[in-house]
Image: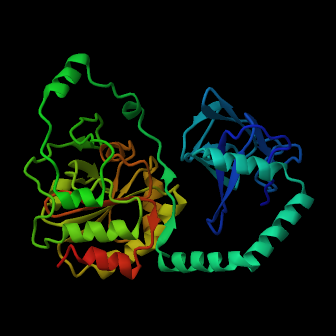
Amino acid sequence: MRLWPYPRRVKTPTGRLLAIHPTSQLSREYVLLKSRVSLGSDQNNDFVIQHDTTSRRHAIIRHRFGRHTITDLHSANGTFVNGRRIRGVTTLQKGDEVRLGAACFILANLLSGAAQRSALRGAKLPVSLRAIAEMVLAAFVGGFGLAQYLAYLSYHQEHAFVLGDAVALPRPPDAQRSPGPSGSEREKTARAPEPAAAPSAAVMVAKPSRVLPGTTDFPGPRSRVEEVPTSLKFGEGPGGNDFATAISLSSLVPGSGTLAGRPAPAFTLHDPGGRAVSLLSFRGKIIFLNVWATWCPVCRREMPALEQLHKDFGGYRDFRIVAISEDQNQAAVVSLIEKNGYTFRVLLDPDNRLAAMYNVRGLPSTLIINRQGVIVWNVTGGLDWSSPQLRQALKKLLY
C-alpha cells in the first residue's frame, strides 16, 4: 500500500491523518491541506491509496464550519468509522478510526501554528531545494550539530520509557454540552469561604488546572457515580511514601502529576463478563488505573509492558492493575485480550463516563490511586512500564 501525502495545491491545514500500517501497526502522519480531500486508488485523488481493496474514487473528507465529515462514494468494500460501515455523510471526531478497505487512518488534532507553517513550506518546496536543505543540514550535523545530536540521543536513551504521545479522546456529547452554574449558584460560590490549602508537598508535585467533576451524575446503565468520602488525605497509609512516589514519577515524566492529591471519583463499571466492579471494592489497595482503547496504536504498544508489570508485581497483594477500555465495540476488546493472553483486570466504559469524571483528554492515560482512594500521580501518553526507573518509583508505594 502506497500513499501520496500532500494534495497538488495547498492552502491552510485543516487537520491530520495518522495512517496505520495493516501489519506492523506503525503510524505515519499526513496533513490535510484542503477543505475537500478525495481518497482512492486513482491517480487524480488527493490521497492515492494503491491497494486492491480501495476503489478508484473511494471517499471524500470535507472540512466545514470547524468540523470534518467523510462521505463514502459507493465504494466496493465500503468505508468504516470506528468499525461501523457508513452510509452518506458522517461527522468525524478527533481519535476516530477510518478504514478504506485495508487502509486505516486515525483523525488527529490540528498542528500548532509553527508546525502548520513548517508543513506548508515542506509541501511547496521543489525537490532541488529540499536536496540543498538536506546538504546544509548534513553539514551542520557534521560540525557543531554533532555534539547537540549526541546529547539528544543520550537524553532519550536515558528516558527511553516514553513510547509516544496520547491520541485525542472524543468527549461524550452530554459532557460537551454540560450546562454551567446559574447566576445564583455562582453568587453562592463567590461568597463561600475558600477551602483549606493542600499540603505543600502536593503543591510541589503539580497544580491541577481545574476541579474534577467527581460528583456529577452521568445517566446510563453501564456506569454510575458514587459518593466520594470526604475524609481522604493524601500521604497516609501503610506505605506512607505517596509524596516520594509522586515526586519521583513527575520528575521522570515532565508535565505529569497534574491531579496529584485529588480524591479519585468513585465509579462502577462492568467487565466483559457482565459483572459489576466498583472502585470502592479496591479500597485498601494501590490501583494502577490505565485508560485505553483498541483503536489507539500507542495503547496497544503499551499493553505488553502492562502485562509484564502485572506478572512481576503479582507478589504484592495490595497492588492491582485495572485497564478501562473506552471502546464501543466489546468484541474488539475481548478479541485483543484473548489474542495476546493479557491477564490483568479489564473493565468497559463505552460511553466515556470515566474519562469525563477523571478529566482524561487522551489515550492512553494512567492514574495511580493510593490505599485511601486519593490520586498519587497521573500521566497522559504511553510509557514503557518495564523501565527500572518507573518500577522503582512505583515500589515506593508498596514499602
- In this rendering, is residue 237 above or below 87? below
On-image quarter of the N terminus: bottom right
Q: Determine the residue located farthest toward the front in the rendered image.
A: 144
* Residue 199, horizontal then vertical, whole percent: 16, 56
- In this rendering, is residue 142 above or below 73? below
* Residue 229, horizontal then vertical, whole percent: 10, 48
Q: What residue appears at the point 80 percent right and 75 percent down from the top-left corner?
A: 139
* Residue 308, horizontal then vertical, whole percent: 38, 78
Closer-to-camera residue (392/362)? 392
Whether residue 343 sits left or right of residue 159 in the image: it is: left
Q: Quadrant of residue 186?
A: top left
Q: What residue appears at the point 30 percent right and 75 percent down from the top-left corner?
A: 393
Q: How is the image coloured?
A: rainbow
Q: What residue appears at the point 86 percent right and 44 percent down from the top-left corner?
A: 8
The answer to whether residue 5 of the structure is visible from this angle is no
Whether residue 190 sits left or right of residue 159 in the image: it is: left
Whether residue 137 sits left or right of residue 108 in the image: it is: right
The answer to whether residue 197 of the structure is visible from this angle is yes
Closer-to-camera residue (35/259)? 259
Whether residue 73 sits left or right of residue 25 in the image: it is: right
What is the total number of numbered labels drawn onto the structure image? Answer: 0
Closer-to-camera residue (398/131)? 131
* Residue 155, horizontal then vertical, whole percent: 52, 76
Q: Quadrant of residue 180?
A: top left
Q: Determine the residue located farthest toward the right in the rendered image.
A: 128
Q: What residue appears at the point 22 percent right and 48 percent down from the top-left corner?
A: 265
- In this rendering, is residue 241 above or below 39? below
On-image quarter of the C terminus: bottom left
Closer-to-camera residue (272/247)? 247
Q: Determine the residue located farthest toward the left in the rendered image.
A: 231
